[in-house]
Image: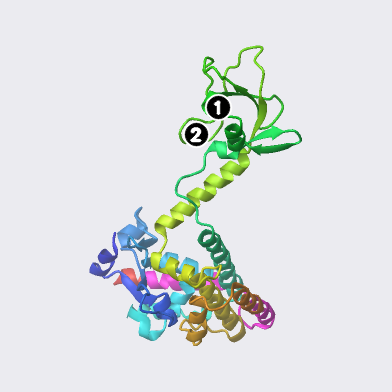
């Protein structure tokens, strides 16, 4: 089933603009995000073809089946609760039956953790992108040999440099594992190229060193350590970097790089927005999706504040949220049974028609 099917079969219950346009934070470069709610045809709902969510390929249009939507409402999921509080001018379609789900029975003290927890995730994202922006990684991955070291007296040196200094080619070397040690090997050299040693790590894209059969009586020339843990961490980081590089929004990346700050400015803007919304919910019992402090939030998005300044704002907001939650008159959590009964009423009415 596709989004077009939902509309053609009159299964749509709600549709709205979301994201920056709903927040009042859109700029000429902003994408148009759409969220919606639908219900399954009766035979599919009672049969084996239930579909909880439908989206387009780019995921900027996402529609939730009413049951899944209500399930997430009860959990005070930020993205879902915001749909219910969409500004009037951003609503594209609304079936009157949606009036049964009133925001007042949804908001609860859970929002302190759901909105605040999501904000903390954004902070981690911002610092993660900082590392990627400031530490770009070459496309060509380092090899196992880059993480090998040769012991020299009471220290160690990089194997590549040691081999070069001593005029030794790694393909003419052989390794045998030292018993009762981790990743420590005796290093042998076949100067006359007669012993068919396997080299240290001469196979393309290998993830480990090679061991060779060593004749009795052969004398090792050194001991080699392979830092396998460091190599594994590096490979993971390299893969993550290039997955991110291939999927990144180039316009957004250029903005983050150009403002010269060590964070993802857009993520940090949403961090502050989420925390401000959480504060308003626990303090005032209201959720205002469209923000009144557009200039302040766009200032953060443009990277005109230092990361420490934005982080300090976030810390102060979290302290206020904690304080206001203690005084809040909001319910501890939504009444799941009451909301579920509303869902049953809605389905009964929809299927009756």
Residue 254, position in %: x, y? 43, 68
* Dots 2, 1 in contact, CB < 8 A: yes
| Real-space Cα separation, disc 2 to disc 1, in angstroms | 9 Å
Give the quadrant of the C terminus.
bottom left
| Residue 159 highlighted magenta (yes or no) | no
Mark 2: secondary structure: loop
Q: Which residues are magenta?
A: 318-347
Residue 320, position in %: x, y? 66, 81
- 11 with respect to 173 (left or right): left
Instruction: Name the residue located 41 percent from the left edge and 73 percent from the top edge.
Output: 345
Instruction: Name the residue located 37 percent from the left edge and 63 percent from the top edge.
Output: 59
Q: Which residue is mark 2?
A: 206
Label ID, residue 281 = none
Q: Is residue 341 visible?
A: no
Residue 343, position in %: x, y? 43, 70
Q: Is 59 drawn above or below residue 333 in the view shown?
A: above
Q: Which residue is mark 1?
A: 210
């Amino acid at each position: 089933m596709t989004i077009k099917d939902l509309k053609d079969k009159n299964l749509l219950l709600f549709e709205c603009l979301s994201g920056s346009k709903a927040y009042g934070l859109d700029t000429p470069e902003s994408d148009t995000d759409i969220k919606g709610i639908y219900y399954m045809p009766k035979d599919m709902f009672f049969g084996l073809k239930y579909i909880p969510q439908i989206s387009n390929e780019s995921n900027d249009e996402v529609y939730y089946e009413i049951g899944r939507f209500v399930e997430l409402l009860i959990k005070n999921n930020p993205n879902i609760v915001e749909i219910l509080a969409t500004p009037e001018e951003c609503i594209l379609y609304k079936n009157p039956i949606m009036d049964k789900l009133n925001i007042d029975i949804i908001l609860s003290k859970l929002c302190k953790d759901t909105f605040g927890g999501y904000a903390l995730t954004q902070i981690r994202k911002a610092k993660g992108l900082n590392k990627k922006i400031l530490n770009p990684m070459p496309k060509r991955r380092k090899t196992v040999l880059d993480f090998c070291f040769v012991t020299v007296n009471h220290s160690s040196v990089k194997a590549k440099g040691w081999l070069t200094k001593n005029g030794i080619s790694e393909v003419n070397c052989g390794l045998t594992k030292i018993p009762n040690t981790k990743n420590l090997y005796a290093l042998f050299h076949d100067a006359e190229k007669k012993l068919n040693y396997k080299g240290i790590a001469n196979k393309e894209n290998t993830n480990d060193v090679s061991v060779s059969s060593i004749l009795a009586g052969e004398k090792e020339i050194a001991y080699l350590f392979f830092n396998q843990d460091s190599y594994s961490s590096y490979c993971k980081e390299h893969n993550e970097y290039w997955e991110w590089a291939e999927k990144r929004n180039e316009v957004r990346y250029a903005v983050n790089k150009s403002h010269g700050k060590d964070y993802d400015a857009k993520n940090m803007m949403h961090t502050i927005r989420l925390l401000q919304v959480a504060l308003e919910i626990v303090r005032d019992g209201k959720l205002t999706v469209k923000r009144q402090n557009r200039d302040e939030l766009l200032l953060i998005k443009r990277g005109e504040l230092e990361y420490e300044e934005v982080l300090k704002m976030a810390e102060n907001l979290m302290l206020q949220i904690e304080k206001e939650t203690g005084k809040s008159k909001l319910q501890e959590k939504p009444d799941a049974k009451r909301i579920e009964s509303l869902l049953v009423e809605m389905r009964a009415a929809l299927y009756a028609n």
